[in-house]
Image (cartoon, rainbow, N blue to C red):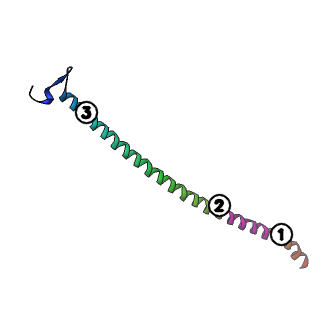
Amino acid sequence: MTTIEHRELKGITVKNLVLTIVSTASIVASVMTTYLQLKNDIHDIKLTQETQNRVNDIRLKVLESEISLLQQQVDEIRNEHINLKQLNPLLTTNH
């Protein structure tokens, strides 16, 4: 027997065993790299989603404020209209 790679253990050569271990290590490294990349991508998406949620909350608050202001303006216009209706008969009877 010349080298350790050519020795056999119950029909399995050390060379095949080394090749299997190296191949498995390569596959594990590839899977771990993909896993870590996916983990980072998911984290980035989560941060983006949280930021978008904050922006949407701010937009919603602004819209709610604008609706409240518009409602106040509508109420003022209604009150003015009612007051004008009430004043109009008085103005027509005085003339």
Cα separation, mark 3 vs mark 2, equals 63 Å
- The answer to the question of whether label 2 and label 1 lie on touching residues, with beta carbons closer than 8 A, is no
| Residue 10 spot, x, y in % from top left | 21, 20
Comparing labels 3 and 2, the label whose residue is closer to the camera: 3
Q: Quadrant of residue 90?
A: bottom right
Q: Quadrant of residue 9?
A: top left
Magenta-colored segment: predominant secondary structure: helix
| Element type where label 3 sits in the image | helix
| Element type where label 1 sits in the image | helix
Q: Which residue is mark 3?
A: 21
Cα separation, mark 1 vs mark 3, equals 94 Å
Q: Which residue is mark 2?
A: 64
Q: Residue at x 30, y 40 (%)?
A: 29
Horizontally, is 68 left or right of 48 in the view?
A: right
Q: Residue at x 71, y 63 (%)?
A: 71
Between 93 and 49, the residue placed more toward the observer is 49
Magenta-drawn segment: 67-80
Residue type beneath disc 2 = Glu
Horizontally, is 81 left or right of 47 in the view?
A: right
